[in-house]
């Protein structure tokens, strides 16, 4: 993008005809630049997705720390899931991407919790999750392939159990051809 702007500036200093064309069509040039930016962002692959981000669809749960917490920025942020709550994360993946969930368990879920994970409209995979650690890394099943997908994650645990989902880390696979 910067290269195109520099090229246009260079052309404007070298040719009065090019400068005149750019003056007359500055709105069209801005629209082309904006379209190029949107296209670039749309083709970008995900590397990390925060579960509390606005593009993640949440069916239950709550932000951590709760709204109104003093100095909220100084606390670890996550999305709290109680038993039966679900999040659906839209992802744009490379071929061979490995997906790892980072988060931690609370209450009775530390000893007996599991995740129900589902890619798009595929089969649900049950993943046992137990741990006392401050942050656990849970490898998730591989995606069905490259491209745009939706990953659904549901917590199952005894009552008084919960999980704090921090983020999905996407370890890139091979580069796409071309």
Image: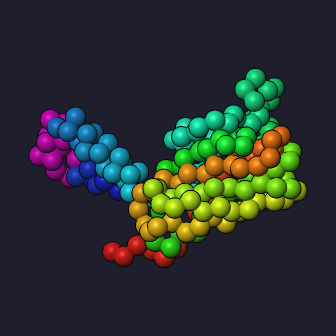
Q: On the image, which quarter does residue 159 sit in?
A: top right
Task: Locate residue 111 relative to residue 173 in the image: left or right.
Answer: right
Examine the residues drawn in magenta and state their main secondary structure: helix
Q: Nearer the viewer, residue 63 or 75?
A: 63
Residue 164: percent from the left, percent from the top?
Answer: 74, 46
**Residue 110 visible, this angle:** yes
Q: Residue at point 74% right, 62% down?
A: 128
**Residue 166 visible, this angle:** no
Magenta stretch encompasses residue 9: no
- Count of all numbered marks drawn on residues in the image: 0
Q: Which residues are magenta?
A: 12-24
Up the image or down, 60 lies above or below 40; here it is above
Q: Nearer the viewer, residue 116 or 88?
A: 116
Magenta stretch encompasses residue 21: yes
Residue 64: percent from the left, percent from the top?
Answer: 74, 36
Residue 75: percent from the left, percent from the top?
Answer: 80, 39
Up the image or down, 85 lies above or below 156; here it is above
Q: Nearer the viewer, residue 12 or 101?
A: 101
Image quarter where the C terminus lies is: bottom left
Q: Residue at point 14% right, 40% down?
A: 20
Task: Locate residue 19 relative to residue 4 in the image: left or right.
Answer: left
Q: Residue at point 33% right, 51% down?
A: 39
Up the image or down, 76 lies above or below 2; here it is above
């Amino acid at each position: 993008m910067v290269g195109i702007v520099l090229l246009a500036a260079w052309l404007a200093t070298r040719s009065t005809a090019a400068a005149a064309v750019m003056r007359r069509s500055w709105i069209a040039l801005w629209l082309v630049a904006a379209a190029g930016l949107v296209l670039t962002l749309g083709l970008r692959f995900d590397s990390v997705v925060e579960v509390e981000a606005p593009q993640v669809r949440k069916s239950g749960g709550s932000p951590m720390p709760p709204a109104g917490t003093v100095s909220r920025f100084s606390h670890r942020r996550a999305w709290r899931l109680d038993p039966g709550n679900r999040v659906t994360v839209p992802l744009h993946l490379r071929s061979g991407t490995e997906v790892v969930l980072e988060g931690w368990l609370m209450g009775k879920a530390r000893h007996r919790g599991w995740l129900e994970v589902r890619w798009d409209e595929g089969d649900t995979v049950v993943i046992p999750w137990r741990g006392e650690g401050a942050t656990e890394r849970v490898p998730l099943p591989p995606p069905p392939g490259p491209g745009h997908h939706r990953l659904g994650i549901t917590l199952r645990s005894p009552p008084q159990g919960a999980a704090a989902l921090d983020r999905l880390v996407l370890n890139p696979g091979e580069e796409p051809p071309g």
